[in-house]
Image (tube, rainbow, N blue to C red):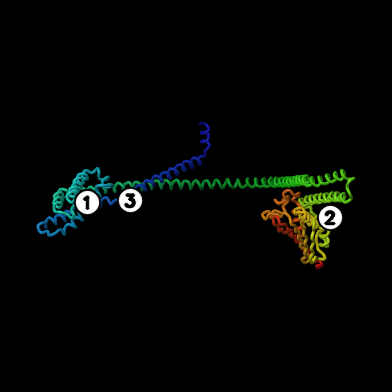
């Protein structure tokens, strides 16, 4: 209990006033809901009263009683002179209407609201008996008869005052009920007016307190603005220092992650790619040592040439890895000069032919420019990767086509093989670092060569296009645009 008391004492007078007013407003809202529900019930009751036509039903019973009585008396007066039964249809129709009025009043809401009135039982009981007796007389007859007329007239003389009294009592009951509804509606309106006035008082009080609170808040706001400005300046200074430190740490972390990633890639590629060439060199050297005395010069030269080819392959791998590292670090040197593009390409093809003498290379040169501006080292690297891939991913008995077409001062180089091909859904991934097509499974490779090709071609403002079909072959098309001022085409 003590903590509760302390909390209550800590409340300010303004807070207590607001809580009391809030409680009063909630009470008014609840009261409004209750009053609304009561008004809804009153309106529904009044509506139902109007739809029931309570007084009308009893009055219609009285009217139809007298109409039938008047028609029966007319028939009785002309009893001696009646000819035929032309009077019967009208009497039958009037009787049926009267019976329907009796049944209406003697059922449902009308009976429920008049059940406590003695006159209701005193009137409706003989009326229903009369209807039952007349129905018994008329049962099976096609028309009304004089016996039924006599019965109705004899009973009607005693029932007429009771029907009049019943109709008057129905009017009295309905008037009393409507008066009660009117009084309840007036009382309801008074309660609603009182509730509305109380709500207005509370709203005015709330508005007054709001103005007072705004005045106090304005004074506090001026003080808080000064404090907030001081805090903002201090925060800005701290954030700048923190941002500078964070940026420095982020750069250091990024650099460390990059170096670590490059190191892991290099170690992974080296351990994977160098294992097979070293095994070939070792096995070939051991075979030479075991059978040196029995080998002729041709076989010995073949073994030594195989070692040289493997060493050349390892050299290409090392150069590719070094270039990949420089490219990752953004340190690739680009030194364009005027070169004989045909001579550079022929030299690369010759070197590849020496490395793989068992493979057929077909060269076509069309309208080459006298001078092409580019970096010979990077162009050689582009062609070495394309030729090496063409040899690696195609059968030994297939040939490789190198077609070079001059376009102004530029050239278009196409390298076509008849190898495993690349699936169409993987073409967009070709050139990504370490990506290899699914058709290259089981074939040695690093997955960095084509990435370097794309980067080196981009340094020449060129483009790379790939056309490939699985099991048929692949064509790499390299566009190397010529620099301004380059020489004219040469045959």
Residue at numbered disc 1: 99
Residue at numbered disc 2: 354
- Left or right position of 106 against 248: left
Foreground residue among 202 and 27:
27
Q: Position of residue 35 (x, y in %)?
A: 38, 46
Instruction: Count all numbered tags in the image, as a single digit.
Output: 3
Q: Position of residue 428 (x, y in %)?
A: 69, 55
Q: Position of residue 20 (x, y in %)?
A: 46, 41
- Asked which secondary structure carries label 2, the reply is helix
Query: Is residue 67 visible to us here?
Result: no
Tag 3 near tag 1, CB within 8 Å:
no
* Mark in front: 1 vs 2: 2
Q: Earlier in the sequence, mark 3 or mark 1?
A: 3
Q: Give the image quarter of residue 24.
A: top left
- Left or right position of 120 against 323: left
> Could you tell me which residue is drawn at 51 percent across and 34 percent down?
4
Q: Earlier in the sequence, mark 1 or mark 2?
A: 1
Circle 1 packing at 10 Å, graded few (<14), some (14-19), many (20+), is some
Q: Earlier in the sequence, mark 2 or mark 3?
A: 3
Tag 1 near tag 2, CB within 8 Å:
no
Query: Is residue 7 visible to us here?
Result: yes
* Mark in front: 3 vs 1: 1
Residue at numbered disc 3: 47
- Asked which secondary structure carries label 1, the reply is helix
Foreground residue among 98 and 379:
379
- Asked which secondary structure carries label 3, the reply is helix
Mark 1 and mark 2: span between their CA atoms? 126 Å
């Amino acid at each position: 209990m003590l903590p509760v008391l302390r909390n209550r004492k800590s409340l300010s007078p303004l807070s207590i006033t607001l809580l009391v007013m809030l409680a009063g407003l909630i009470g008014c809202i609840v009261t409004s809901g209750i009053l609304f529900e009561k008004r809804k019930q009153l309106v529904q009751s009044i509506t139902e009263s109007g739809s029931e036509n309570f007084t009308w039903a009893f009055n219609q019973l009285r009217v139809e009683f007298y109409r039938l009585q008047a028609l029966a008396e007319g028939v009785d007066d002309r009893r001696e002179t009646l000819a035929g039964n032309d009077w019967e249809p009208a009497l039958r129709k009037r009787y049926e209407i009267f019976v329907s009025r009796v049944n209406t009043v003697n059922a449902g809401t009308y009976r429920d609201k008049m059940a406590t009135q003695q006159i209701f039982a005193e009137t409706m009981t003989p009326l229903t008996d009369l209807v039952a007796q007349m129905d018994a007389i008329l049962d099976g007859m096609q028309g009304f008869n004089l016996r039924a007329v006599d019965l109705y007239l004899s009973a009607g003389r005693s029932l007429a005052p009771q029907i009049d009294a019943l109709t008057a009592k129905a009017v009295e009951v309905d008037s009393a009920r409507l008066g009660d509804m009117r009084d309840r509606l007036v009382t309801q309106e008074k309660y609603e007016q009182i509730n509305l006035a109380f709500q207005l008082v509370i709203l005015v009080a709330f508005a007054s307190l709001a103005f007072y609170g705004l005045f106090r808040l304005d004074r506090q706001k001026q003080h808080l603005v000064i404090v907030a400005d001081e805090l903002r300046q201090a925060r800005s200074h701290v954030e700048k220092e923190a941002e500078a430190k964070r940026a420095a740490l982020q750069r250091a972390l990024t650099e460390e992650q990059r170096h670590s990633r490059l190191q892991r890639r290099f170690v992974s590629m080296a351990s994977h790619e160098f294992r097979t060439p070293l095994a070939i060199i070792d096995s070939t050297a051991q075979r030479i040592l075991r059978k040196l005395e029995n080998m002729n010069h041709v076989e010995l030269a073949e073994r030594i040439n195989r070692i040289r080819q493997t060493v050349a392959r390892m050299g290409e791998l090392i150069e590719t890895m070094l270039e990949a590292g420089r490219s990752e670090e953004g340190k690739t040197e680009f030194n364009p000069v005027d070169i004989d593009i045909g001579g550079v390409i022929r030299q690369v093809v010759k070197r590849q032919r020496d490395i793989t003498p068992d493979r057929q290379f077909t060269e076509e040169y069309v309208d080459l420019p006298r001078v092409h501006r580019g970096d010979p080292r990077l162009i050689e690297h582009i062609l070495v990767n394309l030729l090496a891939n063409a040899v690696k991913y195609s059968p030994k008995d297939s040939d490789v086509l190198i077609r070079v077409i001059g376009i102004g001062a530029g050239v278009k180089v196409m390298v076509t093989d008849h190898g495993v091909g690349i699936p169409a859904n993987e073409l967009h991934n070709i050139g990504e670092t370490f990506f290899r097509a699914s058709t290259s499974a089981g074939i040695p490779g690093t997955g960095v060569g084509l990435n370097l090709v794309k980067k080196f071609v981009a340094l020449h403002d060129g483009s790379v296009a790939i056309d490939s079909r699985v099991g048929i072959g692949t064509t790499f098309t390299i566009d190397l645009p010529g620099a301004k001022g380059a020489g004219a085409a040469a045959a």
